[in-house]
Image: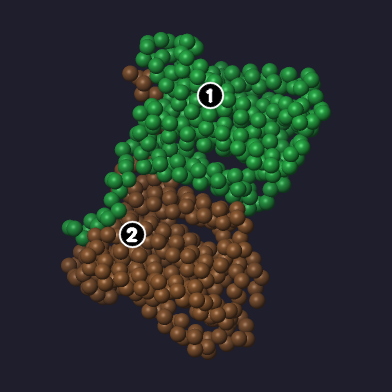
Chain colours: A green, B brown
């Protein structure tokens, strides 16, 4: 078994590199969707699957797969409440790459957003839970069959079902939060199931316990894959209908908050944290949320550093 | 003697309330200067002293005096490296009051700035040095006669003198950093001298040592007053020539950085801090700096939350 602090740094590095891959994949996939839209094929939001014929889309998928793989491994080493919020770095990577390859200009507010995103992430990492009680797959299975967690899963499924039946047909194409809520709600389950899968794989490799032979492992693996497909499908629709600049911050906030809720129900990471650390990680998260908003919401505003004249004299002086 | 943690909270409360008074005083004094400018008198920046006849200016001065008094006391209870950065809260108070009384509209970026200012301050307070080695006036006097600190004072005086002679006549009215550097450099000494004065007063009241009878106390008191007058004079000139929206962030950053340098030379607060706390307080400070910039530099940009449509559909969809 690795040392707790080693485990933390391995998980942290995996989470950061996964963000770089996922951030790039966003931009690659978006450029594929633009090509499809230009070629006059049926769009993803209209139920079209033309993107499957685009090699750039597959490249984007591959990049995302590598990123998600690293992410999956990260969950095996560090608490979910640390890994998921680090996803903000993918927003940063996407913003920088979009300004390079998708001709989406990054203005001065966006640059301040990039800066705050990094600062907020550092603050969050300083205060986040460094390790957790659960070390084995069996322990995690035990937690997964806990009543409170089962109620959470049931609630998510019922709410998602209602949204799918009632809200998607009416507001799906006009209100951005509909598809993204489905995405995030299912996503919070994906994260938990993936964590279990990752833990089983890690356990099989590093110890003598062969968790991969456990029937529950395969059940969790299949559930994870189904959840990922649903999540990806809704994210694709959302990205196709709405502007990336609004999809990204809303998705980030919803997804992270729901993962933290799911994770805290399951692992109770916060119970063993000092109150200053809870406050600190909350503040770090809020800085990141503000940064993600700045990075995205002000995209179309024309502002550069030169417009803000540092030597501006008092207007009243000049009257 | 009070307990260390009590001392921290007393100092923190004093620092926060002092920011409220100082923030208000900024707005009151600015409104006095506007009245003078409107009445056609010789302006402060032109060497005029018409503001002395304005009762609002005196009210502003009184408010500032109360604020500075609370600030002075705060220095006796907590490290300077905590008290000075909290001055950012005065920027927040000034921004909110300016939008109420000086018709300076607070836009959406400004509101995000207010929010980040509070978050950044909380992060900074979590990580700041909570107490320091020096507990008595004699100890502080000893530190003040330390070679390194005397070199700092000498450097500040020489640089200030050169700026006053060479740069003020040429660039004083066009480059905002000239007057504000003088202000901040002298200010960093004011803070240290005031801390000594405050410590002596606190010691005389709470213990049997009568530090107020010490000759050095009076020397430090007079030096402090002289420094404050110089500092106030330059700040007035600066506020009169340049827009508050640029004066405030530049002054805040320069002043805080120089105080932290002076304080770390003198008290070596950082030596006993954990590396995560140094990193954390640095991050908190950067968040506050960004917030102060957002609060001020985007003042004249027309942006409201309504302009950033949350339900914005993909432009490419609509083509």
Q: Position of residue B259 (x, y in %)?
A: 46, 66
SS at badge 1: helix
Q: Is residue B92 visible?
A: yes
Instruction: Give yes or no for contact between labels 2 and 1 (Cβ–Cβ under 8 Å).
Output: no
SS at badge 2: helix
**Which is in the foreground here, disc 2 or disc 1?**
1
Residue visible at 77% across and 26% down in the picture: A204
Q: Position of residue B299 (x, y in %)?
A: 33, 50
* Towards the viewer: B176 or B17: B176
Q: Is residue B141 above or below residue B39?
A: below
Assign the C terminus of chain A to one quadrant of the image: bottom left
Residue visible at 59% across and 35% down in the picture: A15
Assign the N terminus of chain A to one quadrant of the image: top right
Residue A193 position by quadrant: top right
**What mark, if any, has residue B247 been given in the picture?**
2
Number of marks drawn = 2
Q: Is residue B245 left or right of residue B148?
A: left
Q: Is residue B51 above or below residue A34?
A: below
Pointer 1 chain:
A
Q: Is residue B146 above or below residue B118?
A: below
Residue B173 position by quadrant: bottom left
Q: Position of residue B205 (x, y in %)?
A: 58, 82
Q: Is residue A309 left or right of residue A175?
A: left
Q: Position of residue A198 (x, y in %)?
A: 69, 28
Q: Which residue is mark 1?
A: A63
Q: Is residue A227 left or right of residue B46?
A: right
Pointer 2 chain:
B
Q: Is residue A277 above or below residue A263?
A: below
Residue visible at 32% across and 73% down in the picture: B161
């Amino acid at each position: 078994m690795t040392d707790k602090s080693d485990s933390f740094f391995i998980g942290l590095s995996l989470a950061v590199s996964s963000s770089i891959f996922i951030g790039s994949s966003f931009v690659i996939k978006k450029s594929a969707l633009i090509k499809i839209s230009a070629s006059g094929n049926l769009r993803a939001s209209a139920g079209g699957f033309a993107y499957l014929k685009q090699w750039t889309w597959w490249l984007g998928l591959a990049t995302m797969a590598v990123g998600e793989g690293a992410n999956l491994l990260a969950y095996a080493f560090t608490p979910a409440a640390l890994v998921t919020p680090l996803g903000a770095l993918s927003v940063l990577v996407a913003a920088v790459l979009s300004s390079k390859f998708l001709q989406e200009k990054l203005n001065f507010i966006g640059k301040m957003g990039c800066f705050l995103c990094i600062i907020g992430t550092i603050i969050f990492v300083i205060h986040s839970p460094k390790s957790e009680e659960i070390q084995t797959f069996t322990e995690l299975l035990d937690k997964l069959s806990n009543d409170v967690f089962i109620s959470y899963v049931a609630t998510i499924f019922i709410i998602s079902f209602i949204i799918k039946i009632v809200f998607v047909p009416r507001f799906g194409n006009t209100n951005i939060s509909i598809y993204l809520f489905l995405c995030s709600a299912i996503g919070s389950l994906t994260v938990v199931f993936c964590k279990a899968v990752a833990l089983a794989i890690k356990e099989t490799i590093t110890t003598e316990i062969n968790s991969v032979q456990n029937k529950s492992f395969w059940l969790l693996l299949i559930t994870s894959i189904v959840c990922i497909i649903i999540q990806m499908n809704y994210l694709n629709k959302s990205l196709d209908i709405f502007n990336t600049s609004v999809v990204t911050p809303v998705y980030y906030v919803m997804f992270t908050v729901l993962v933290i809720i799911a994770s805290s129900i399951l692992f109770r990471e916060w119970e063993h944290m000092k109150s200053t650390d809870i406050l600190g990680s909350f503040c770090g998260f809020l800085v990141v949320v503000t940064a993600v908003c700045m990075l995205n919401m002000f995209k179309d505003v024309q502002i550069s550093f030169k417009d803000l004249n540092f030597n501006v004299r008092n207007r009243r002086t000049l009257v």
